[in-house]
Amino acid sequence: MRFARDLDIAEEATADAFELALRTWPTSGVPRSVEAWLITAARRRAIDRIRRESRLRKALGQLEGELLAGEPASGPTGYSRHAWYAENGSATEPDDELRLAVLCAHPALSEQSQVMLMLRLACGVATESIAAAFLTKPATAAARLTRAKQSISSEAGAFTLPDDDEVEERLAAVRRATYVTYTMGHTAGDGHELRSGELVAHARHLASTLVAQHRDPENAGLLALIDLTEARAPGRLVDGAQVLLENADRGSWDTDLIASGLGLLDRALRADPPGRYALQAAIAAEHARAASFVDTDWRRVVDLYAVLLSLEPNPTFAVGRAVALSHAVSPAAGLADLTELGEVASLQSYPYLHAARADCLRRLGRPDEARDAYRVAARYARNDAERSFFLTAS
């Protein structure tokens, strides 16, 4: 993208390079430096495409000159160094993936378009999955992505890393995209598997890079949330089937990730007031600390959700608070809140609202109603493993 100065050409040239690799490597062998080969091939394909773009003909001579002058293909070029990337007093170059996320968080775009573009370009999320995350049609998501790319490409200096103050302003959108990527990996948007390890890895990499290169407590809160949630991932399945948290094998939880998350949480909670990711991480920490499901401090979880909702009135957080209330007070209290939340349009296709209602109904001794609610949850399930879990529970 830095080389071509055009998002569409950059994407197409990169795809061309991978296609060429698939055709030639089986006979020529895998090159010593895969990254250098792919970047060089992509740049040459970009030049071919630029030749066909009359509006960029004037830039062709300069671009060809850069390539022929032996510009290193194996590493990033054209960086602007900033104090934002300084750690322990020494300037460091930004991680490419994080740099791309910052560039996508362009102020000319709406927050939703920024996040969608980051998911597509920096995290490699398919357009169909982005559409599912934003409860819209794939064609609508594709159109928004196209408009976002065109808007960025038309802005002067769009491919240059902004100054420190502007980077600071863009971090909230970068964190949000990282969090959305993690949630999409934690529960896959489609397919047979419950989760997508690739998206989880993308999200944790971005969050780790944010923590390493910037000391904002919310960055620590985001990584703490990912680590504390991911620590419980091995216990989500028993004999290959998804289980409720109360039936999870806590002995399988990753103690190293829990320790990492709790340490990061201490840093995140130093902010006054703590941010949304720190509060979510604090909720995850209550589950991680509890020796058993019944030992969970549900009253504190309810209180943390209340503070979180005061910062961001997200309806899915309200579902989490209702679930905690059902354990802290009574299933009837939780069910009352969940029934009211069922009137919120954006939650009507949210499977865990219906699953939470089903669980409350089951605990209240109303099995037929619980079965119906689980079947509704299965109708809106996002992947086969989740669907199977709801149907089995029904």
Image: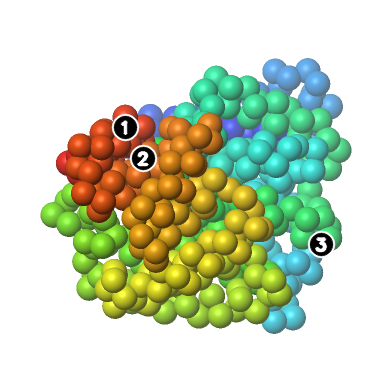
Amino acid beneath label 3: Asp
Nearer-the-camera pick, 349 or 242? 349
In this image, 391 relative to 256: left or right? left
Q: Is residue 246 visible?
A: yes
Left or right, 317 with respect to 197, comes to right
- Percent position of residue 282, x then y: 51, 70
- Under mark 2, the amino acid is His
Determine whether 82 is above or below 169 in the image. Answer: below
Q: Position of residue 186 (x, y in %)?
A: 39, 51
Q: How is the image coloured?
A: rainbow
Circle nearer the N terminus (1, 2) = 2
Nearer-N-terminus badge (3/1): 3
Give me the residue at 50% from left, 47% from top.
316
Q: Residue at x 32, y 32 (%)?
A: 376
- Quarter of the image with the C terminus in it: top left
Distance from the alpha carbon under mark 3 to that under mark 1: 48 Å
Residue at x-position 69% and y-position 71%: 273
Dot in front, 3 or 1: 1
Disc 2 versus disc 3: distance between alpha carbons? 45 Å
In which quarter of the view is residue 248 placed?
Answer: bottom left
- Residue placed under numbered mark 3 in the picture: 164
